[in-house]
Amino acid sequence: MSVLTMIDEVLRRLGCETSAGNGKVRSTCPFARVTHAAGRDEKPSFVVFPTTKSGEWPPIYSCQACGETGSFEDLILTLWARGVLSDGDRILLSMYASADGKAELSSASGRLVARSVSRFEGAISRVSAADFSIAPWRHWDEDGPWHDRYSIAQCSEVPELPAGSYDEFEGGVPRYAIERGLAIETCKAWNLGHNRADKRLMFPLYDERGRLVAYSGRSYACRCGSRDSVGEYRCSICKTSLVDGAEPCPACGGAPKKTRTLCSKCGQRWPPKYLHSYGFKRNLFLYGEHRRKIDRGDTVYVVEGNIDAPMLWQAGYRPAVSTLGSNVVLKGAATSVHVEKMIAWWGRVVIVRDGDEAGRKMAAGIVRAISGRILSSVVDLPDGFDPARMVQERPDELRKLLGNPTVSV
């Protein structure tokens, strides 16, 4: 049996869908449940090469989606040591024997595998010497830490924005932040900022270790400075622009259909509500996770929006984190990075759900993934309200829903 065939067999036994050809094996990623945001690899992204490009041994693997790379030999060793592959020793010995003297190996590598028994004995010694509690194998070992490595591995740190591109709050607070109820102390605690050029409230995003991962900017005005917008409507038949959208199309009588929002002052398209640093994968980070060791507590308050987390924190409900969107657990996925972080870091989750369809979707996904694993509860806010607005407009009602704050403010 060739090395390629044995690699294919091992991956199939791990539940992967495989295909071999062109001197390599391609399959779905065996680490997908942990390393992929959706918890699965819909397009086969995992590739194993029998040798490196220079023809060296041992086989190596690489996932083009999550970036996980390593030695396939070490993968088999780990699975064997943990009992996932009970015949890992047989597989390794067969791989060494099949590789002996093959033309595909360089002369240097050929010398390494020329004595299969010696190579095999060396592999056995590494089983006892290796530390198999590291992150990559949590797919099979539910006890090991994992979130630090896999969160940052899929979203590299970004450099600081150019000097002068935005001001910290000490230098100037946009009126929008005050209108939304954010206190200066809260802005400083969360390191918020102000992008004057793009008219955005800036949210630096840090990972659990405090490393800067990305920026998120919340638009509060058009670039021309206007804070008023108007919906642009188009005829559903002839696509003629109907700015007011109140009357049937004068050209053909078709009904208007809203397509986008325009600035009432300059007529340009209204900027996107949120912009994140290029390449940032928001479904791998909880906004506010960097404060976990500062805001100690066994109960975490989970919200959806950027502003909601610091506002709830300002009201004394700490720790508070945001999922940065409602699509937390994808359809068909058993869990997500967000959910696994909540389970790893806290003992109880309180989901403060927005009073809209997106909020209901977020809460339903988290509850489905977290049910039976740790304590959880859902707090429904009135229709049309989010946590930030409740803190600002109905603080007494919010206190009745959530109970007393964990921190007196």
Image: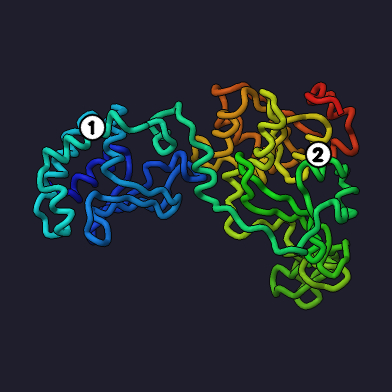
Q: CA distance from mark 1 to mark 2?
A: 55 Å
In the rendered image, which residue does mark 1 sit on?
125
Of callouts 1 and 2, the N-terminal one? 1
In this rendering, position of residue 137 left or right of residue 230: left
Q: Secondary structure at mark 2?
A: helix
In the rendered image, residue 282, in percent from the top left (x then y), is placed at 61, 48
Q: Is residue 160 above or below residue 207?
A: below
Q: Is residue 237 above or below residue 94?
A: below
CB-based contact (under 8 Å), mark 1 and mark 2? no
Nearer to me, 62 or 242: 62
In the rendered image, residue 65, in percent from the top left (x then y), is placed at 44, 53
In this rendering, position of residue 99 left or right of residue 230: left
| Quadrant of the snapshot with the C terminus | top right
Q: Is residue 166 above or below residue 178?
A: below
Label count reads 2
At 74% from the left and 70% from the top, the residue drawn is 235
In the rendered image, which residue does mark 2 sit on?
311
